[in-house]
């Protein structure tokens, strides 16, 4: 097919196929968060048992982020991308064959490995196939599938599928996406090659062990009150030791069997972007958790309504991504110039959300959600280009893998810490507010009488209304407690950037001073 198409059209078809492949990963990444309740009913599993399906998926994805570059370097990004798509397509279909938990966990491991491979190989292929001058727009389009879709689009679509069909259809939706992606990638032709590959088996085992244990800790630690639980403490210790050994091995005893066969860490821009990616992942995933949770627990939205609430923010995110790409490409400004604007817009959005009340509705949230999405769009395109555009061709897949790894770790950490923060603030705020609910307090007695009168007006007899007034007041108290706690969590994200910004400026200056010294790392920036 490629011989009958012009080069620009072939490149466009290939890019569309890569975006569809990234969308497949977005579906797999968010599937269990939407279909969890239905799956619990069908599998007769406990929440802890089903949670393991998420743990193994994320752990497999984290592991393959650092392993996939070895295969991309050995056989080329096109072959790796096609293999990832086929594996994700087949494992998504296989999820519907059985409700056995072991089978589901196996399918989720394959989906994690395939999804991570798709992201690394797909983004590498875009850097290889498109000219340097077009990368801002190309990477913005890729981020629509890789960043925007899992944060906004797929949760809403999956909520609709669960409400109107069954959870199986979430995974079945990946089949037509996969077929279309493979057909479009046919435009890239057959560019497979083979280089000798030496897998660092021991490092991969250490990486997999550390990823699995620390993923479990981050996803389940809050439920067991973190380090008050002996098992969580033990798993954290083993995971940190495994990752520590791996880091020492990779930095102090480098050889041909290293995970980072060609290290991107010699680039100051890459190191800076990697640091910022962790914070950006924290902000993206943390806010993506807070907003639907606030809508569900405080505003009383349905699950579908909470998912749809993120769609305007997703549209703004896509707009921000494309706007940033076009501005950078057409004006030639340095991408880092957009980072402060992205940070300020996001922080402003969180500040506006921190003033929400229990009476807030969709119109009250529209402006902050738009600012959040547009700010994150500016931030992610700028970060991608700052971090990756200057890497040499051999180092690029390894840089992309580390960049994705950083965003994923930052996102998990953000969600875990914000969950814990809200739980602690709920206890604190409940204690403060409950102190005012004492027998004999004139304001409390007046509120109880008013509530009872309203119930009597609606047809309830006086004695029953008097008894029902106190539970209603307690429910109003809990709602107010939750509102204050979520407002404080939104404001915590503002504080995060207020603290992180000067630290990142110092880090940028430090890395810049290192770059001014003689380069002894062997790093050679190269435009692709």
Image (tube, grey):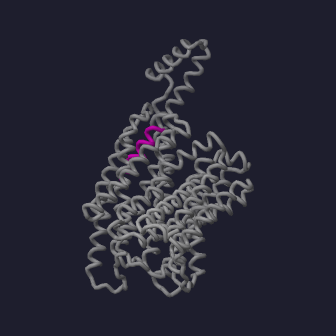
Q: Is residue 156 on the magenta stretch?
A: no
Q: Position of residue 240 (x, y in %)?
A: 53, 70
| Magenta stretch, overall SS | helix
Query: Measured along the vertical axis of the image, is residue 396 above or below residue 493?
Result: below
- Evaluate whether residue 239 shows in this view: no
Nearest the eye: 336 or 182: 182
Question: Residue 109, how many percent across, how many down?
Answer: 63, 64
Instruction: Write the start and end of the magenta stretch as one range.
Output: 482-495
Task: Classify the position of the C terminus by image quarter.
Answer: bottom left
Viewer-nearest residue: 382 or 486: 382
* Residue 471 position (above or below residue 97): above
Residue at 56 percent of width and 14 percent of height: 458
Return the x and y of residue 190 as percentages of the image width and height. Answer: 54, 75
Q: Judge whether 275 appears above or below 205 on screen.
A: above
Is residue 45 left or right of 197 when viewed as pictured? right
The front one of 5 and 342 is 5
Horizontal placement of 278 versus 78: left or right? left
Residue 197 visible? The answer is yes
Q: Residue furthest front?
A: 4
| Residue lying at 44% horizontally and 20% vertically, measured from the top left | 442
Q: How many labels sit on residues?
A: 0
Residue at the (34%, 44%) spot, across then down:
351
Residue 120: where, in percent of width, then height? Answer: 49, 69
User: From the viewer's perspective, is 425 left or right of 100?
Assistant: left
Which of the 4 quarters of the picture holds residue 395? bottom left
In the figure, is residue 188 to the left or right of 373? right
């Amino acid at each position: 097919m490629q011989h009958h198409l012009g080069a620009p059209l072939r490149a466009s078809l290939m890019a569309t196929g890569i975006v569809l492949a990234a969308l497949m990963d977005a579906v797999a990444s968010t599937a269990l968060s939407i279909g969890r309740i239905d799956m619990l009913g069908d599998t007769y599993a406990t929440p802890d048992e089903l949670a393991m399906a998420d743990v193994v998926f994320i752990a497999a994805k984290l592991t393959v982020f650092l392993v996939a570059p070895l295969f991309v370097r050995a056989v080329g990004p096109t072959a790796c991308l096609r293999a990832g798509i086929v594996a994700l397509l087949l494992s998504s279909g296989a999820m519907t064959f059985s409700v056995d938990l072991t089978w589901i966990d196996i399918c989720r491991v394959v989906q994690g490995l395939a999804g991570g491979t798709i992201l690394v190989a797909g983004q590498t292929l875009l850097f290889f196939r498109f000219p340097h001058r077009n990368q801002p727009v190309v990477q913005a389009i890729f981020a629509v599938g890789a960043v925007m879709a899992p944060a906004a689009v797929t949760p809403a679509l999956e909520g609709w599928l669960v409400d109107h069909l069954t959870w199986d259809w979430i995974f079945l939706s990946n089949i037509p996406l996969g077929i279309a992606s493979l057909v479009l990638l046919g435009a890239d032709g057959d560019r497979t090659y083979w280089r000798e590959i030496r897998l660092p088996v021991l490092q991969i085992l250490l990486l997999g062990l550390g990823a699995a244990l620390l993923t479990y800790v981050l996803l389940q630690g809050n439920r067991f009150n973190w380090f008050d639980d002996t098992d969580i403490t033990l798993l954290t210790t083993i995971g940190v030791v495994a990752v520590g050994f791996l880091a020492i091995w990779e930095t102090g005893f480098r050889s041909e069997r290293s995970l980072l066969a060609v290290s991107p860490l010699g680039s100051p821009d890459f190191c800076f972007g990697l640091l910022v990616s962790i914070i950006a992942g924290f902000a993206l995933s943390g806010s993506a958790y807070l907003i639907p949770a606030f809508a569900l627990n405080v505003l009383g939205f349905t699950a579908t309504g909470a998912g749809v609430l993120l769609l305007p923010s997703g549209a703004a995110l896509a707009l921000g991504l494309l706007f940033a790409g076009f501005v950078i490409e057409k004006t030639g400004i340095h991408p880092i110039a957009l980072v402060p604007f992205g940070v300020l817009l996001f922080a402003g959005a969180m500040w506006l959300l921190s003033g929400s009340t229990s009476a807030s509705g969709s119109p009250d949230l529209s402006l902050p959600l738009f600012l959040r999405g547009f700010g994150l769009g500016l931030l992610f395109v700028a970060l991608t280009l700052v971090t990756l555009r200057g890497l040499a061709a051999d180092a690029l897949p390894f840089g992309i893998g580390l960049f994705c790894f950083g965003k994923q770790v930052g996102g998990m950490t953000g969600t875990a810490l914000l969950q814990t923060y809200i739980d602690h603030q709920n206890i604190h705020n409940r204690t403060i507010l409950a102190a005012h609910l004492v027998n004999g307090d004139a304001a409390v007695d007046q509120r109880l009488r008013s509530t009872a009168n309203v119930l009597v007006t609606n047809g309830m007899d006086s004695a029953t209304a008097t008894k029902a007034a106190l539970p209603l007041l307690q429910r109003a108290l809990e709602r107010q407690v939750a509102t204050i706690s979520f407002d404080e969590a939104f404001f915590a994200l503002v504080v995060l950037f207020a603290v992180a910004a000067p630290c990142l400026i110092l880090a940028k200056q430090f890395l810049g001073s290192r770059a001014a010294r003689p380069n002894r790392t062997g790093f050679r920036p190269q435009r692709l």
